[in-house]
Image (cartoon, rainbow, N blue to C red):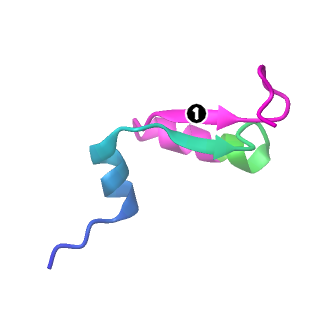
Amino acid sequence: MNKVTSMEAAFEDKKPTLILGGTGKTGRRVAERLTAHGLPIRIGSHSGEPSFD
């Protein structure tokens, strides 16, 4: 049986991954790593415009 990982599924899907808190210390690192792998992202943050509240 061939098990598909969530990372492999994300590569096939190409829908953006929403990163909540993407401007913070951890969220920024996650965003950088996903974009380095060529995955589309969307960042939600309190400090962004428009605010993600």
50 over 46 or under it: above or below: above
Q: Is 43 inside the magenta-drawn segment?
A: yes
Which residue does the image show at 52% across and 35% down from the upper left? 41
Q: Position of residue 20 (x, y in %)?
A: 70, 45
Pick out the residue farthest to the front.
Answer: 53
Which residue does the image show at 40% across and 38% down from the upper left? 15
Q: Position of residue 11 (x, y in %)?
A: 32, 46
**50 on left or right of 10:** right
Report the number of numbered marks.
Answer: 1
- Quarter in which the C terminus is drawn: top right
Which residue does the image show at 58% across and 42% down from the upper left? 18
Pick out the residue farthest to the left.
Answer: 1
Which structural element holds mark 1?
strand
Q: Is 15 inside the magenta-drawn segment?
A: no
Which residue does the image show at 39% across and 61% down from the upper left? 6
Q: Amino acid at mark 1?
A: Arg
Q: Position of residue 1 (x, y in %)?
A: 14, 79
Q: Which residues are magenta?
A: 30-53
Pick out the residue farthest to the top.
Answer: 49
6 over 31 or under it: above or below: below
**1 on left or right of 52:** left
5 over 16 or under it: above or below: below
Q: Position of residue 29 (x, y in %)?
A: 65, 45
Can you identify the residue that label 1 sits on? Answer: 42
